Amino acid sequence: MREVFGQGAYRVRFDWGPAGADRIADGAACVVVVDVLSFTTALTVAAEHGISVLPYPWRDASAVSAAARHRAELAVGRMAARSAAGSETGSAVGSAVGSAAGSETGSAVGSAVGSAAGSETGSAAGSAAGSEAGSAASVSLSPPTIARAAAHRRIERLVLPSPNGSAISARMAATGATVVGVSLRNAAAAAAWVRRRAAGRPVAVVAAGERWPDDALRPAAEDLWGAGAFLDAFVAGPPEPDGVSFEAGAAIAAYRAVAVDLPAALAASVSGRELTAKGFEADVATAADAGASTVVPVLTDGWFRPHTLDPADG
């Protein structure tokens, strides 16, 4: 029965979550992990900025220890990062204004931060506040936080906890297969990279999905589309029945159905609406930027490291 669920008769396979990954990874040269909102999108953005990422299953005390041990930055929760950014911005502005508060000029500086663009001192104070807040901003699973932080400071290593894509990536590392992180941003580039390295051997594509409150797997449309985008580019044409499993073919069909307006589809998905309702619509827009990246994160010695296409990858 395991042979049936493993899709072993097919070279190109697709399934969901940790259990599905265990079934289809057997004998695969490459395992592709897809978690569009938001682990693999955050991972892709990190790779675009030259950051190595340690996938970690949970955000707990052990993650703190791992970050300290590897001298890496630890991604915090989305809401924690937002709160920290707000506090840092307010503190920086208050400090910039307060430092000049001993004089009438200082009073003018405080006013200038708000409205008097003609004051060079006020302009400098506002600029310094923004720069200080940006450079100190916390990184989270929200992809834009990674891009903003990387624009202000050098980040070499990042511990990125996630109970879905990150946990599956760490789990698949033990199979001996090459593990690749794929989002809508880099699906085409990753397909070219994997096609060359797999060289005709089996490839397993895993949609991470989300979790219901009882921890049961919730299949997520965005991960089906992300997997389909990779598979569509990987097979480079209609699925061949003897090479592509019917599950993989279904993912391709699902992607093709929304490819004409992917940003709208992603925004209308359950996960997209959930993030937008919480004020993270920028996360959805970043994830929907299909084809924006040519960088491929590949798991090596426990860390996702950025790889770029070479001319032979096509």
Image: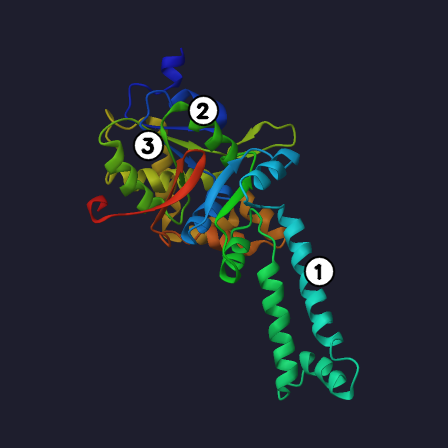
Marks 2 and 3: CB-CB under 8 Å? no
Say which amino acid is labelled 2.
Answer: Gly
Q: Which mark is residue 87?
A: 1
Q: Secondary structure at mark 2?
A: helix
Name the residue located 43 percent from the left edge and 24 percent from the top edge. Answer: 174
Camera-side mark, 2 or 3: 2
Q: CA distance from mark 1 to mark 3?
A: 48 Å
Q: Secondary structure at mark 3?
A: helix
Say which amino acid is labelled 3.
Answer: Gly
Name the residue located 70 percent from the left edge and 74 percent from the top edge. Answer: 96
Front-lying residue, 100 or 266: 100
Q: Which mark is residue 249?
A: 3
Residue 257 in sight in this render: yes
Q: Between disc 1 and disc 2, whose residue precedes?
A: 2
Q: Which mark is residue 20?
A: 2
Q: Secondary structure at mark 1?
A: helix
